Image (cartoon, grey):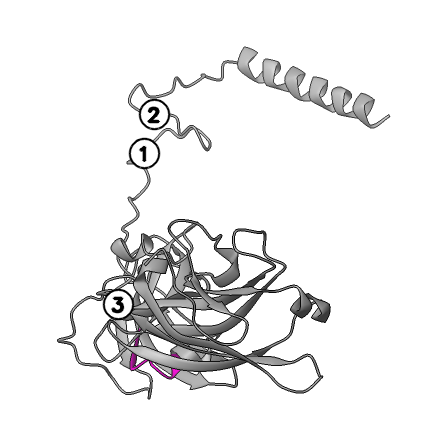
Amino acid sequence: MMRSDQRHVLGVALLGLAVAWGAGCKKEEPAASAPVDAGGVAVAAVDAGPVAKVVKRLRFSDVSLKRLEESVNVTYTLTNPGTAQGRGAACMMLLDERNLAITLVRLGGIAVKGGLADTFEDQVKVADLQWNQARSVMLFTTAYGAYCTSRDLKEPTSEPFRLLTTGEPASAALPMPAPPQESKPEDFAVSGVRVSRTGSSGRSSIFFTVKNVSDHRASGAGCLRAYAKEGARALEELDVGDFDLAPKASTTLTESFSFDDDTHWGEVTVLRFFASGYGCADTEGPNNPGQPFNTDGGEAQNDAQ
């Protein structure tokens, strides 16, 4: 019914238009110089085209940091001096006293229209191990679709903003920091590994010293693997301890642990400790041989060394 009515109205309109032309109304020809906009309605006047959007780097201001239990609350204002909308993500890099990158984290998505400013508040998880070594932070934004990686630091869409973790302004003379590097097993030297079993609760403790022997910051985790014999598949594997070290720095850690199956202690003859970027997530092999030691606490000879 609706479609029939529409066709009737259209017919009447066309008939009226034909009568008007027949009475001598002149049909104007479109100007030859008037281009038709592919995205809109044709106009008789010459269209100069859309005004080009100007992209300029965003600017941070009014930045504040608040340390919570295991996270950091970051409040900041972004100003867009261009005419094109700025979209992407805000990132934060933690830097140590040597201006070396500790970690790089994503704060959240941002969008600021051209010529305007907007204020954002993000909360990001940062471990005490990293925050306690940080002396300053650097904020920057990335293009839409990026995720605050080392690659994004090479082409930020904002002017980098630096401040101390206390909230005070950082020195403008600080050079642009290099992004964090991937940690490898060869970045770490392990010594003094021993295990202590106390009581019948099933809880044990592992003691070890790990040193960063590289020329850059290195972070990672310890992994304890237990074997019935050398060369066999591990009966147990457990992540034991995190570390984040400046070049040539070392730390001694004590971590408690327990086997998933406590009866495995009766089968285990060899324990092996690994230090690498991702702990037990990194597989053992020629590039990650680990440090073997006996179950009685005596350190064994590592043939890979």
Q: Quadrant of the C terminus?
A: bottom left
The disc at residue 47 is 1
- Say which residue appears at 50% left-offset and 76% top-offset: 297
Circle 3 residues within 10 Å: few <14, some 14–19, many ≥20: some
Residue 65 position, x and y percent, is: 40, 83
Instruction: Tell me the distance, in whole angstroms, between the alpha carbons under discs 3 and 1.
Output: 66 Å
Query: Can you name the residue that lies furthest to the top here?
Result: 22
In this view, the residue in front, 270 or 201, is 270
Identify the secondary structure beneath mark 1.
loop
Element marked by disc 2: loop
Q: Position of residue 210 (x, y in %)?
A: 36, 73
Mark 2 Cα shell of 10 Å, populated few (<14), some (14-19), many (≥20): some
The part of the chain drawn in magenta is 131-137
Q: Residue at x 54, y 64 (%)?
A: 270
Q: Is residue 150 left or right of residue 278?
A: left
In primary-sequence order, the first of circles 3 and 1 is 1
Q: In the picture shown, does residue 148 fall above or below 51?
A: below
Q: Which residue is mark 2?
A: 35
The three-letter code of the residue at mark 1 reads Asp
Are the residues tagged 3 and 1 within 8 Å (C-beta)? no
Nearer to me, 64 or 246: 246
- Report the side of 263 relative to 113 (left or right): right
Going by the numbered disc 2, the residue's amino acid type is Pro
Q: CA distance from mark 1 to mark 2?
A: 7 Å
Q: Earlier in the sequence, mark 2 or mark 3?
A: 2
Please state which of the two labelled residues, at mark 2 or mark 3, is closer to the viewer: 3
Q: Earlier in the sequence, mark 1 or mark 2?
A: 2
Q: What residue would you read off at disc 3?
A: 213
